[in-house]
Amino acid sequence: MAVHVAAHGADEVDHLYAETADLRLTGFVLFLISDVVLFSSFIFAYLYLRHSVPQWPWPPGTAPLDTAFAAVNSVVLFGSGATMHFALENWKHGNRSKWFGWLIATIILGSMFLGGQAYEYSHIQATWGGSIFGASFFTLTGMHGFHVFCGVIYLIILGLQTSQNVYTRQKYFGLVAGTLYWHFVDVIWVALFFLFYLL
Amino acid sequence: MSISLAQHHHPQGIDGHIHQAPTSFVRKYVFSIDHKIIGIQYFVTTGIFMAIAGLLAEVIRTQLLSPNAQFVSPDTFNEAFSVHGSAMVWLVIIPMLTGAFGNFVMPLQIGARDVAFPWLNMASFWMFPPAGLLLFGSFVIGAPQAGWTEYPPISGPQYGPPGTTMWCMAIFLVGVSSTLTGINFLVTMYKMRAPGMTFTRMPLFVWAQMATAILSMIATTALAGALLALFLERVFGIPFYDPARGGSPILWQHMFWFYSHPAVYIMILPAFGIISEIFPTFARKPIFGYKAIAFSSMAIALLSFMVWAHHMFTSGLSPSIEVAFMLLTMVIAVPTGIKIFSWVMTLFGGKIHFTTAMLFAIGFIITFLCGGLTGIYLAAVPVDLHLHGTYFIVAHLHYVLFGGSVMGIFAGLYYWWPKMTGRMMNETLGKWHFALLFTAFNLTFMPMHFLGIMGMPRRVSFYVNDPWFIFWNELASIASYAMAGSFLIFLYNALSSLKSGALAGPNPWGARTLEWQIPSPPHYYNFKNIPAVYSAPYEFDKPLPYGNLQDELDDSKVPPQLLHGHGEHAHAGAH
Amino acid sequence: MDTSLIEHLIAIVGGVVVGGSAVVALKNDWSATGLDGNVTKIMLGLMAFGCLLAILAAFGVLGNPISKGGA
């Protein structure tokens, strides 16, 4: 979110910015919580449906999911979370070039995750509408993948914005929001990886 | 607690943070970011939707005037009650209590200049009329017919009318609007209270809005999940609720009611807040049990997530689960009872002014209490097994939603009308409105208890040719027409007040909360100087507990930064 | 080397590296205050937990028997 730097004195703008950034942070965290509820309702649906049939995957004869591949893909995504953390740390310390480096690494890893999901989708035996197995798996991981995709777009935008000096070392709420969103997407995947591949 | 006048940490700042006043008609009244204008936009839109949904109710009552009437076909009857219920819940009661009352009153009561995210507020509003168009527009291709609860498989791809998909989209859209409003309000109430306004010095209407905003934020997204799944099943054939492919209709019921039970508390908590404001003002007494009322609102919000399956007692859940939900449902009656007790004790020993607002508030206590008591009967599983799906439930829900929420809405409308418009309503007309509405309401819905106990099922367009069934149904239908007529009294009163009502002045009721200390209607900037707050507002025997309000009513004293705005700031609204 | 072994190795090594950096970052930020500081700490902790799950999955301790190669 662009912040227009006003013609007034730096102090006044800074204290106004600090107050409004505080509001925006609270609002953004509340938004993330409501997004968690959205995933939770589908996770409930998945667990309910899974519990209502005697075996999983359903129907019997469906091949199980590839846990090893998913473990690798998960590590890729978690890695992108770590690189995003380092990116923001570097921004806070004023290292623009390191910010860009770690940001690009995050974007690459995030895109690799999406590629991995695409590979997984094309190799799975189930279809989206074929049974409750496909329904719950594709809907949940699809919703998550969509969130990752939006996150990658957002990170690209943040990269472009920082290259145009929209943010400063003091005023960078957009970068905080992007980092929190990326971690949120990461954490949802922890839950989905556990629920689909390890349960 | 001493008030630090160094308000640098406060989002308003000593010098405030003021937008330039908008000048064009479109920015002032159509795409406004002023919470007061947005509140009025919600009032007008929900009013229109209420009229349409009310007409649908009259279609229902006209069909039920006689046991085998041919007024409408069974399918049309189904469409009527489905859209009536959906519209009343999602397009009238929830938006009116949160978007309309919450938007107009809450920021004024906390001493703020606006909500935390004014542009988001405007976006939330503008999602709302399209949602209404989608819902009512579903009649064109075949409106939903499975009630506002839309259980599959009747709502599913095989049996559901095409308009059910529009219903999904409409409710999803209004749900997004509601969730964003909840987030907006929560941040506002958490971060933008005037200096000195600790949580226990907030007006009780604000406490109610806070509990409601938490529910709006968390529960509504759960509904979005259920609606999305139904949409996917109808449009793309993805099996969630289809038993043939492993799905379960019970899953819909769980997902739907997990939201919809908190939703009924979204529909009543703001009304509770309105009553908590009106009673001290018109009894000239401090509210009895401020902390009890405040904390019971939060307790109700928390407990509301734990009782949803009491709507599912006949769906085949295991008895032990049903007992657990039965007990939790009975527990949630306790904080509500505490509130009713506190309100009644507020009146006790007070000097009561029977204004129209007060009459509606007292009427609320009577009719909501009735609805709450029938709720406790229904909480008992053995009773509910007989009464589920009968007119007893229709009676119960209308006593709490009409006798509760709508009575609260009218009480709030008569109370805050002078503040919103600067004009007084005609009190005589208002009292006639109350008398007619209260009588007609009870004559319409009290008989439905008897009909339910006698076994009349809901959502069916005909009934048994029995003298008592006919008598009670005829009485209910005729009284419902009187109810509709009473709305016309209100409409006439409102329009003539706007045209030529007496000027109101800042505080016609002698109330003590912050919104009454500024002109009616408030200036676009709300307060010339952000007030300081020293205690809770309801101590009628003490002086007003505010500082910094000396210039509010003197228009020659506008601080310079308000005259010039912070015009040099190229402020995007989403600052 | 078949794909399955490569997958196992990447999962384990990656999990250790990423999880390790998450833990180190968490340790460094332990005293952070404020909403974003605390939320970041929670996120890093959950990320480390996720890496632990991936490692345990790769060792076969958790989860369904891992299939050989692509599904």
Image (cartoon, rainbow, N blue to C red):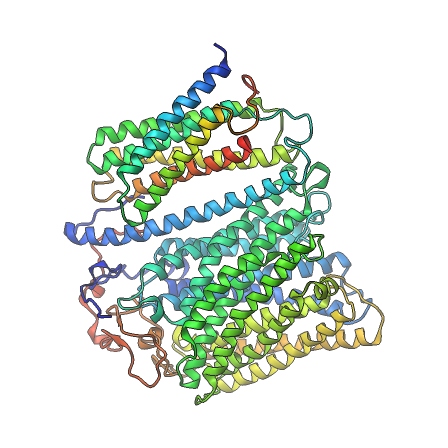
Whole-percent x and y of residue C64?
57, 27
Whole-percent x and y of residue B515?
35, 73
Q: Is residue B90 placed above or below B496 in the rendered structure?
A: above
In the rendered picture of this protein, how many numbered marks are placed on residues?
0
- The answer to whether residue B425 is left or right of residue C66 is left
Given residues A193 and B276, the one toward you in this image is A193
Q: Is residue A160 visible?
A: no
Given residues B201 and B338, the one toward you in this image is B338
Whole-percent x and y of residue B153?
71, 47
Q: Quadrant of residue B321?
A: bottom right
Q: Residue at x 77, y 59 (%)?
A: B73
Q: Residue at x 73, y 65 (%)?
A: B390
Whole-percent x and y of residue B340?
52, 76
Q: Quadrant of residue B518?
A: bottom left
- The answer to whether residue B403 is left or right of residue A110 is right
Farthest residue, direction right: B465
Q: Is residue A55 placed above or below B408 in the rendered structure?
A: above
- The answer to whether residue B504 is left or right of residue B433 is left
Q: Residue at x 26, y 37 (%)?
A: C28
- The answer to whether residue B240 is left or right of residue A26 is right
What is the quadrant of the N terminus of chain B in the image?
bottom left
Q: Is residue B236 visible?
A: yes
